[in-house]
Image: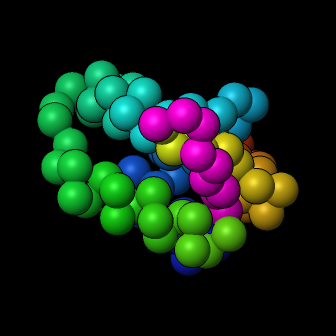
Amino acid sequence: MAKWLQSGPRRDLCVLLSGSEGTAQRLKSRLEAHYDERLDPKTFYAQLSALENSGLIEKRVEGLADVYSLTDEGERALREHYEWMTEQLR
């Protein structure tokens, strides 16, 4: 598994980006709803930066918002992790 997917929040960010892109605020809101708790903004943005620096996600600026999407490498790593989870849950 890719080193950057060993963290639950980073892995969950990649899951949220599979199949669709999203703004940082939308991603943060969706994770907070899933975890049922507020995320520290500094930590959240550090996780986005780590994923971007590792090549699993990419960012583009659209107006005033940063929009994130999963890269091909991120998609591959996420699919490999999904297959591993599926095998473990049998």
- The answer to whether 5 appears left or right of 33 in the picture is right
Image quadrant where residue 56 sits: bottom right
Secondary structure character of the magenta stretch overall? strand
Quarter of the image with the C terminus is: top right
Q: Foreground: 32 or 2?
A: 32
Residue 78, image x, y percentages: 70, 52
The answer to whether residue 78 of the structure is visible from this angle is no
The answer to whether residue 32 of the structure is visible from this angle is yes
- The answer to whether 40 appears left or right of 10 in the picture is left
Q: Foreground: 19 or 6?
A: 19
- Measuring 69% from the left and 37% from the top, which residue is drawn there? 18
Quarter of the image with the N terminus is: bottom right
- Span highlighted in magenta in the image: 56-64
Q: Is residue 37 above or below residue 1?
A: above
Residue 57, image x, y percentages: 64, 57
Residue 7, image x, y percentages: 42, 62
Q: Is residue 85 above or below residue 64?
A: below
- Measuring 57% from the left and 74% from the top, which residue is drawn there? 53
Q: Is residue 19 above or below residue 61?
A: above
Image quadrant where residue 36 sits: top left
